[in-house]
Amino acid sequence: MPEVTLFWYDGEIKPSPEIMPQVIASLGQVPHTGCLILGDKGMMVSTNDYGQEAYIALKGEKKMKSTAKHEALLAIPQTIPWYCNGGQYIEFVNACKGNGKCYSDVDHSVPMLEDMLVGCIAQQIPGKLTWNSSKQTFGNPAADALLRPHIRKGWEF
């Protein structure tokens, strides 16, 4: 995949309202949690930690619309099967029992988790970091030191 630039915000540190006028116009405030994706054709915001509520605005649109109701998304055929309509928790339990697999199975969730963990490290190291996923390194000694867990004596494996 081509390189992308990610900005990590956490706790009370949030993106500026100026970069998301459609979100403010639609929701009244910067969400307390979630994910904001800015692209060439518009923006998408998830307003919780699990992606259950998401909104989209294409370039030129003044307000966000639910991803379940936006005309541009309704026209896209569903090509990835949903394995469970009971939500991610039921889906996970069913997969553990051997009944289907998760919609965001390991091939999708492991790279996504890598991004999240890189963000957690970025919070702890001042300055700009560049992550090399294929080599699993920042090239920054302080950041690289956080890549491996600290294992207390007696708990080694």
Image: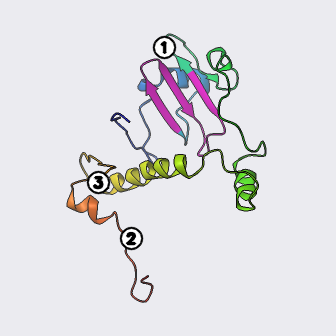
Which residue: 60% across, 42% down? 48
Looking at the rendered image, the disc whose residue lies closer to the viewer, 1 or 2, is: 2
Tags 2 and 3 in contact by the CB under 8 Å rule?
no
Decide: few, some or many residues near mark 3? Use Cα within 10 Å; few <14, some 14-19, many ≥20: few
| Relative to 40, 107 lies left or right | right
Q: Which residue is mark 1?
A: 59
> Looking at the rendering, which quadrant does residue 69 occupy?
top right
Q: Amino acid at mark 3?
A: Lys
Which residue: 60% across, 22% down? 26
Q: Is residue 70 above or below residue 31?
A: above
Q: Would residue 8 be counted in the magenta stretch?
A: no
Q: Which residues are magenta?
A: 35-56
Q: Which residue is mark 2?
A: 149
Which residue: 24% across, 45% down? 128
Marks 1 and 2, the one that precedes in the sequence: 1
Marking on residue 135: 3
- For the C terminus, give its image quadrant: bottom left
